[in-house]
């Protein structure tokens, strides 16, 4: 069954700690995305990747880092530099530009201890 | 920078009433997509519009793309409790990978 898998579902971060959110897709999609959603808010783009070994900053990239070493995987690291990381993080993928719908994972809810 | 606003932010309707959400972009869009997010869930793609003035229907849902390609609307006829959720529009200005999501309209349907 094709789809996007995000893990973990819930994550707690201590002050000064880096944490990594996993995103894996088996849809053979070239493009992958990370969004942040705050309560009652829309989705804001953190990073996106059009192809393996390439990624671009979105609107709120500060305090985050990503890698795209494999087509199927696009992990997001929330660094200690991100002072307000509590949010719902959504990973998405699509087959490329020009009107392609995005498929989303179930999300990871990150909280500060 | 580019902004995509949606109104209203919240809407409560009685079951059977109609509902409309409006999406407005500060810049011309090459296309627009609509997504629905159920409470506690993730956004699910509904439809995309590409042409100026385009109208598409999905059962009780009607989607429109403005003539100037800077605004769009979603209209639901005779709402049902299954329509509950947040509706987002997402616009792309240049046929690239980068979509800007609207602020969303949260719909609550009272039985």
Image (tube, rainbow, N blue to C red):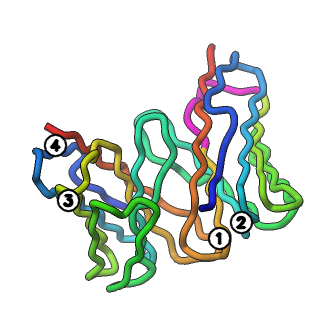
> Would you name the residue on which mark 2 appears?
B31
| Magenta residues (range) | B78-87
**Image point (32%, 85%), residue name:** A53
Q: Are marks 2 and 1 in contact (CB under 8 Å)?
A: yes
Query: In the rendered structure, which disc, 1 or 4, sits on the residue that comes first in sequence?
Result: 4
Looking at the image, which residue is at 18% across and 40% down? Answer: A112
Q: Chain of mark 1?
A: A
* Dot 1 and dot 4 residues touching (CB under 8 Å): no
Q: CA distance from mark 1 to mark 3?
A: 32 Å
Count residues near mark 2 (Cα–Cα under 10 Å), then give few for <14, some for 14-19, many for 20+. Answer: many
- 1 or 4: mark nearer the eye: 4
Q: Residues within 10 Å of mark 1 (few under 14, many from 20)?
A: many
Q: Which residue is mark 4?
A: A12
Which residue has dot 3 on it?
A79
Q: Nearer the viewer, mark 3 or mark 2?
A: 3
Residue drawn at the location 25% of the way across and 44% of the way down:
A110
Identify the residue position indicated by label 1 in the image: A99
Distance of label 1 from label 4 (alpha carbons) = 36 Å
Residue A106, how many percent across, how many down?
A: 36, 49
Q: Dot 4, crowdedness within 10 Å: few (<14), some or many (≥20)? A: few
Check whether the beta carbons of the residues at disc 4 and disc 3 lie within 8 A of each other. Answer: no
Mark 3 Cα-neighbour bin, 10 Å: few <14, some 14–19, many ≥20: some
Is disc 2 placed on a helix, strand or loop?
A: strand
Compare residues A11 and A78 and report the one nearer the observer.
Answer: A78
Spatial CA span between label 2 and label 1: 7 Å
Q: Are marks 1 and 3 in contact (CB under 8 Å)?
A: no
Q: What is the spatial separation of the Cα atoms under label 3 and label 2, in whole angstroms?
A: 34 Å
């Amino acid at each position: 069954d094709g789809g996007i898998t995000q893990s973990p579902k819930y994550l707690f971060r201590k002050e000064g700690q880096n944490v990594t959110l996993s995103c894996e897709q088996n849809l053979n999609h070239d493009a992958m995305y990370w969004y942040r959603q705050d309560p009652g808010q829309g989705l804001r783009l953190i990073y996106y990747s059009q192809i393996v070994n390439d990624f671009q900053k979105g609107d709120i990239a500060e305090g985050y880092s990503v890698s795209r070493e494999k087509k199927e995987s696009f992990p997001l690291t929330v660094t200690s530099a991100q002072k307000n990381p509590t949010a719902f993080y959504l990973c998405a993928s699509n087959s490329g530009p020009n009107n392609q719908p995005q498929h989303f994972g179930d999300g990871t809810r990150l909280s500060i201890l | 920078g580019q902004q995509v606003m949606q109104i209203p932010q919240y809407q409560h309707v009685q079951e059977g009433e109609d509902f409309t959400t409006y999406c407005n972009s500060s810049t011309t869009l090459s296309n627009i997509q609509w997504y629905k997010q159920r409470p506690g869930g993730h956004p699910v793609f509904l439809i995309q519009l590409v042409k100026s003035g385009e109208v598409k229907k999905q059962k009780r849902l009607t989607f429109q793309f403005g003539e100037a390609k800077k605004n769009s609307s979603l209209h639901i006829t005779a709402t049902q409790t299954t329509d509950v959720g947040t509706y987002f529009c997402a616009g792309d200005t240049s046929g690239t990978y980068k979509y800007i999501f609207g602020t969303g309209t949260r719909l609550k349907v009272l039985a």
